Image (cartoon, helix red, strand yellow):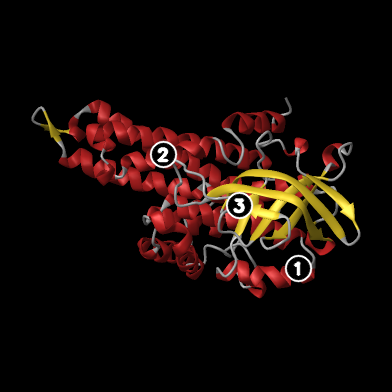
Amino acid sequence: MDFSLSAEQQERYDRIRTAAPEISSPGSAAIRRHGETWKEMAALGLLGAAVPEEHGGGGFGALDTALLYEGASDGGADTGLLFAAAAHLFACVRPVLEFASPQTRKALLPALCSGELTAGNAMTEPDAGSDISRLATTATRVDGGYLLDGVKSFVSNGPVAGLYVTYATTNPDGGYFASTAFAVDRDSLGLVAGEPMRKSGLVACQTGEVRFDRCFVPDDRVLGSPGQGQVVFRTSMLWERSCLFAIYLGQQERLIRRCVQHARERRQFGKRLADFQPVADRLADMRLRLESGRLLLYRACTEIDAGQDPSLWVALAKLAVSEAAVATSLDASRIFGGRAFLTEHGIEEQVRDAAPATTFSGTSDIQRQLIAREMGL
């Protein structure tokens, strides 16, 4: 059992870590600058990492893809931007790759990988978050396709996306097979994308509402077969709950470095902060959480790459890394004291970016339920 990265993986990690600061944060000019920022991330391989080269992607498996995102985050790329790229790749591009028709894959994947086309993850509804079995959005069968009606909320990349991967109920009595997945063009008649929501965290990932009003989607934009919505969604979640959270490994690595430096330099009562045992203990706990989560996340990605059932490891990794991200960001704020609340130090931003991690992609409580189910309870 080898716990070290190969020379090739380490070189790739170091390269993206060095290039990460070049990714610009769109700030207040988000919509105007989106295309430029998106192309910067595409150039680093983040938008198509887990897509075969024949479709314009990097051809990486789950572990190498996770390492790209971890390296970019470790290097200082904005967490919200990386989250936007990850939502694009894992919640949208992967479903198109795995479930779309050959013609649709050929039409969409190169543009999705190159940054010419942004994808939005339109699953969550006002009354349905992680529960895809109770979607109010419906898809009614008509000649040549479906008519979608409903509202999706918290759509990552919603205001700027050119393509939406969405889910709708096609058979209310179908149980597990009640829903169907679709890839819907932004310019489809009856689709309205709302303005960006004002958020306190992950600000650079633009999030909005998307409405479907008798929006026609042709048959060739069905992902998988009618009734396979749960299959498509759960497959995408295996990638998202593992690879996306590598962003938070990089964020924790960055925070720990900053805290160690601060503890060495900051003096109180005539001593370095590092010389106070409670501060040293807190830093040790931060490192413990990071390395524990990293091992679980790498294991989950390795199981995906090996073609094994990764469900247990993915749930364990998502739970461990997300909870660690929140705890470590709060510990960093305690180590920095009052300075943590000054925007110039960026600690409060890291707290705000970490806080949603225990909610999106399935809450911590849901991960515990999944783990218990895998244990046979």
Q: Position of residue 323 (x, y in %)?
A: 49, 34
Residue occupying the far right of the picture: 143
Contact between marks 3 and 1 (CB within 8 A): the answer is no
In-front residue for pair 202/154 = 154
Disc on res. 104? 1
Residue at disc 1, secondary structure: helix
For the residues labelled 2 and 1, the Cα–Cα distance comes to 38 Å
Disc on res. 352? 2
Where is mark 3, residue-wise? Answer: 302
Left or right, 127 with reference to 73:
right
The amino acid on which the numbered mark 2 sits, given as a three-letter code, is Arg
For the residues labelled 2 and 3, the Cα–Cα distance comes to 30 Å
Q: Is residue 260 above or below residue 5?
A: above
- Nearer the observer: mark 2 or 3; the answer is 2
Quadrant in which residue 134 is drawn: top right
Q: Position of residue 259 (x, y in %)?
A: 27, 41
Mark closest to the chain's N terminus, 2 or 3:
3
Mark closest to the chain's N terminus, 3 or 1:
1
Look at the image and tell me whether residue 291 can be seen: yes
Residue occupying the far left of the picture: 270
The amino acid on which the numbered mark 3 sits, given as a three-letter code, is Thr
In-front residue for pair 170/357 = 170
Left or right, 244 with reference to 96:
left
Q: Residues within 10 Å of mark 1 (few under 14, many from 20)?
A: some
Q: Residue at x 45, y 57 (%)?
A: 30
